[in-house]
Amino acid sequence: MSNKLQAVVFDWAGTMLDYGSQAPMGAFVQLFARYGVNISIDEARVPMGLAKWDHIHALGNAPRIAAEWARVHGRAFSDADCDELYEVFTPMNMASVSQHATLIPGALEVVQALREQGLKIGSTTGYNRPIMEVLAPLAAAQGYEPDNLVCAGDMPSARPGPLMMVKTLADLGVWPPASVVKVDDTVPGLQEGRAIGCWVVGLAVTGNTLGLSEAQWQALTEHEQAELRARASAELYAGGAHFVIDGVSQLPGVLAQIAGLAAGGVKPA
């Protein structure tokens, strides 16, 4: 069976739109503050890429936050608490994504170029379906409409497991996984690609790993940028990336390398 590239599957926030993955962060901080527990943006970013219920669960069980929750509420953070916070979080995040929906520079041009090469464009996200019902039309208005969409909650389990990618490959009608490239800015998102056997490409600058807006990134010195890029790249490589680039605009060069490897019979390890 040929491993010639057939499809590229993109994450959403921090990958194709919302430079720095800004939308969820304030919502997580506000969410826990509403329940009397202060968390930082840095703490909120740690589980990024997971489905949002799983993300809230991970935050509530992080040692410092769990201790503060127990102090404030007189009991340990529970799954029932997570259920309640998740219901509160979804409308907060729906409001936030509408303010952070701008496509990342180069995203639309890259997708157009990939389509011209005959590649299919898939998408998975840690956002649930109600949030994406707000975000997807905003992306479409800018010209970005992938061939499918699999949201957290659509499958029995989400990232870092493979089921969202299994659904995506089925939607796109492509196989084997070695003919597919998953592009993501978070470790759980990369791992869902690795779990099914795809090539995975991490994004070091435009996504959650750095968490900076485009203006914040551009304001840094070259030395500061190099240090942050190296740190983020190391994290993504450690998380399973086969390749790491700054952002989606650099993807065509990596895809050419992957295509060459596939043509030579090399499969993603």
Image: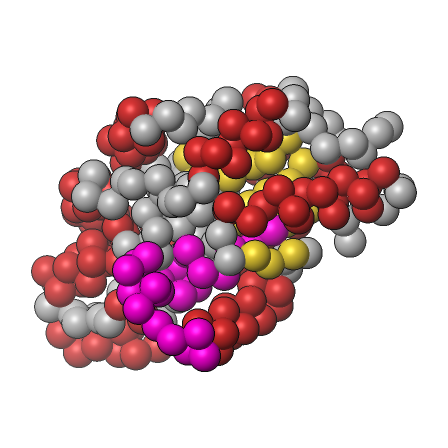
Q: Residue at x 42, y 55 (%)?
A: 206
Is residue 34 something one can see in this rendering? Answer: yes
Where residue 5 sits, quadrant-wise, is: top right
Residue 258: image location, x then y, percent:
74, 45
Q: Residue at x 85, y 38 (%)?
A: 263
Q: Which residues are magenta?
A: 201-224
* 84 vs 230, nearest the viewer: 230
Residue 238: image location, x then y, percent:
61, 68
Question: 204 above or below 64?
Answer: above
Question: 188 above or below 255?
Answer: below
* 106 vs 190, nearest the viewer: 106
Where residue 225 sits, quadrant-wise, is: bottom left
Q: With 3 as the anchor, is 191 left or right in this view?
A: left
Is 218 within the magenta?
A: yes
* 57 vs 40, nearest the viewer: 40
* Outermost residue to the right: 264
Residue 182: image location, x then y, percent:
59, 43
Q: With 98 as the anchor, is 45 left or right in this view?
A: right
How is the structure coloured here?
A: secondary structure
Is 246 within the magenta?
A: no
Residue 145: image location, x then y, percent:
42, 25
Q: Residue at x 50, y 69 (%)?
A: 229
Count of all numbered marks drawn on residues in the image: 0
* 106 vs 148, nearest the viewer: 106
Q: Quadrant location of the N terminus? A: top right
Is residue 70 something one can see in this rendering? Answer: no
Q: With 249 as the anchor, is 174 left or right in this view?
A: right
